[in-house]
Image (tube, rainbow, N blue to C red):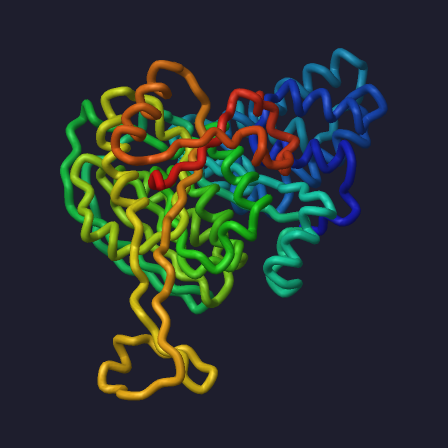
Amino acid sequence: MNLERIEGAKRELMASFLAMESPTIVLGLSRKIGDGSISNVAQKFLNDFCFNSTMVRRYPPSSQYMKSVLKVLILAAESEGQEIMEDLYNQHIAFLSSTENDEQHAMGGFYNCTQRCYKSYLYSLPDDSIKKLVSCLGSKYASKFKDLILTIQVSSNMLEGSTGRRNSAYETNQCTWVYLLSIRKVKSAEKKSWCYLWPAGIFLSEFILANPNIFSKRSCLEIGAGTGLSIISLALLNVSKVIATDGDCSTLSNLKHNFEINRHLLEDETTVEIQELIWESASAKTITDWGADIIVGADLIYDSSSIPYLVALMVMLLAKRKQGSYLVKGGGVIMQQEMQDESTHDNSHQTSVTCPIAYVATVIRNIETMNLFISSASQAGLDVEDVTETMRPPIFLPQLKFNRSTVCLHKIRQST
């Protein structure tokens, strides 16, 4: 999609539609580009760049959402005495005549999945943020951040769940993928879907893209990756490896799908792992083997009963690690393990201890739950620092209308 000539209100309108923002927001922006009404200019833009764009046809928002937007637009245009474009009328009629069980979407043969749909996020990074990315990653890696669009499949049913696990592996020519899941039954009462994007996840994605120097060339892991917007953002930053974890089968499968959608943006050397992680039964050995340098998470602190398991998991993830000694010989670095028989060398050093750090974004719904987490973490030897104001990211997704002041950011590490 060529976005160079789509700026201002038109860009915001398209971005809002792709992200499935409220139909009333779409209506207001449509009037803005139509000089105060749903004019022919506004209708043509909506038809060409929203309802019939290549991206929408490939990754459509929910049919219910598009039907609602069309209804609001047509009623507003009729009340203004505007002539309605035939294409918009026909699309609305097709939506009205379709049923929930239709296998084919009313528009252009779209596949109609009643519980899943797509949201596409058009990022608007200012010049100084682009320069920061160029400085950290190099122009080769940073060019993709101009008019960056990330598309994710989300659930329109927040109670959607799953009942099992699958084992599979997947590789592409562009990057290395590992998709490792174990078999586990889940009781119906335990079913939860995290295939829904919450404000803290959006905030975390913006924080990640605003701080490439923290993440570049590091091994990064996300706890409760959900839809994958944050971990995909991490994968764009030339990290050595990203590990997306979650405990739900449906979510893990959806994560794999979302990485596949966006894999054209990833670099050859980026390794992506999608791993099952059950907080209650997390293995210290497995977590040590993952070797993550940076841990991120969004909206993890929501249930007081899960706090002990989350703190125990954090303790394992943030444990200090020794990297092993190495030799400096002839100007090159050679790992000690590979040089056990070497009897002479120029200089010998020990690598510094790796101290993993976690960044967790949270919308505080219950202050007592947050306080319980902070006190429990402190007792377990973790330092929890509120860095919301000192590290608050710029707004890269201005089309998303939520109160960012409700999101806080904590930096967590082992106490010194």
Q: Quadrant of residue 125?
A: top right
Residue 365 image point, x, y percent: 41, 16
Query: In the orientation shown, which residue stands out farthest toward the top?
Result: 79
Q: Does residue 160 lie above or below 344 as drawn?
A: above
Residue 19 image point, x, y percent: 57, 33
Q: Residue at x 57, y 22 (%)?
A: 405
In depth, the one of 348 and 150 nearer the eye is 348
Q: Quadrant of the C terminus?
A: top left
Would you say residue 203 is visible in this rendering?
yes
Is residue 120 rendered to the left or right of residue 193? Answer: right
Q: Residue at x 62, y 19 (%)?
A: 71
In depth, the one of 92 and 385 nearer the eye is 385
Q: Residue at x 81, y 25 (%)?
A: 39
Residue 385 image point, x, y percent: 44, 31
Total marks placed: 0
Would you say residue 143 is visible in this rendering?
no
In depth, the one of 124 and 27 nearer the eye is 124
Query: In the orientation shown, which residue stands out farthest toward the right?
Result: 35
Is residue 185 rendered to the left or right of residue 233? Answer: left
Residue 213 image point, x, y percent: 55, 52
Q: Quadrant of residue 102?
A: top left
